[in-house]
Amino acid sequence: MSKNLKIGVIVADRDEYIPFVNEVSPYNPQKYDYYNREAISFELSGNEIICLNCGIGKVNAATAAAFLADKCDMILNYGLSGGISGVRRGEISLPDKYLEHDFDLTAIGYKPCEKPGQEYIYSADSKLLRLAKELLWGVVGTAVCGDRFVSNEKDREFLQNTFGAVSCDMETAAVASVCSMADIPFMAIRRISDDAGDTAVESYTDMNKNEGETLGQIFLKYLSFVCEQF
């Protein structure tokens, strides 16, 4: 069991961030200086946790990851995701692979999401993934990420058929990309809010409003386990 680790946590949506802040109030979280955005730090089992509310989307997420990369020993993410295949609303997705579904150079001969001359399918850290599987009842599979809220059947089928995706979101692959370049461990814990189909907007709004606190509790449980086991 390690102590004195610095663990970065990236949360996109403020409605997902605030319930976690409330959950960790017994640890006396302090405001943290992060580009005039909301952020906190606190101690958990002898480790420093830095949690950033980065804002929605890949640019915001990558910026947060780059900010944390030279400060932290690992980076974690949690949030809500659309369900693509093999996972139901309310379930936990434990992505083992991350890719950007909206990166597209197919017009000049590359595969969907392929980035010339560099890695473009990123992997979760094996130990962090193992700990998540030990602790949480979740579905393991590929998370696809893009700067678009997927909300129709055609796009959902494309993501399933092209990438074998389990879930979709707007941040994970961006964070995974930075962590891969910085050679630091990364893992995301995502809860399925909708089916990425025609009713996705209504389902996401309902889940975000009513079950964000539960998501915060789940992630704090995982974070505590990481602090104990890593």
Image: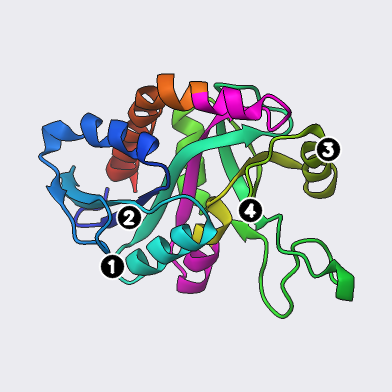
Mark whose residue sits in front, 3 or 1: 3
Residue at numbered disc 3: 154
In whole angstroms, how far apart are the C-alphas of marks 2 and 4? 22 Å
In whole angstroms, how far apart are the C-alphas of marks 2 and 3? 36 Å
- Residue at screen point 66% across, 58% down: 100
Range of residues picked out in magenta: 177-205
What x and y, as percent, mark residue 189? 48, 39
Q: Secondary structure at mark 1?
A: loop
Mark whose residue sits in front, 2 or 4: 4
Give the image's coloring scheme.
Answer: rainbow
Q: Which mark is residue 104?
A: none
Q: Nearer the viewer, residue 18 or 85?
A: 18
Q: Is residue 153 left or right of residue 38?
A: right
Residue at numbered disc 4: 146
The reply to whether residue 109 is in sight is: no
Q: Is residue 173 above or below residue 83?
A: below
Q: Is residue 102 above or below residue 86?
A: below
What x and y, as percent, mark residue 76? 41, 50
Residue at numbered disc 2: 8
Proximity of marks 4 and 1: CB atoms separated by less than 8 Å: no
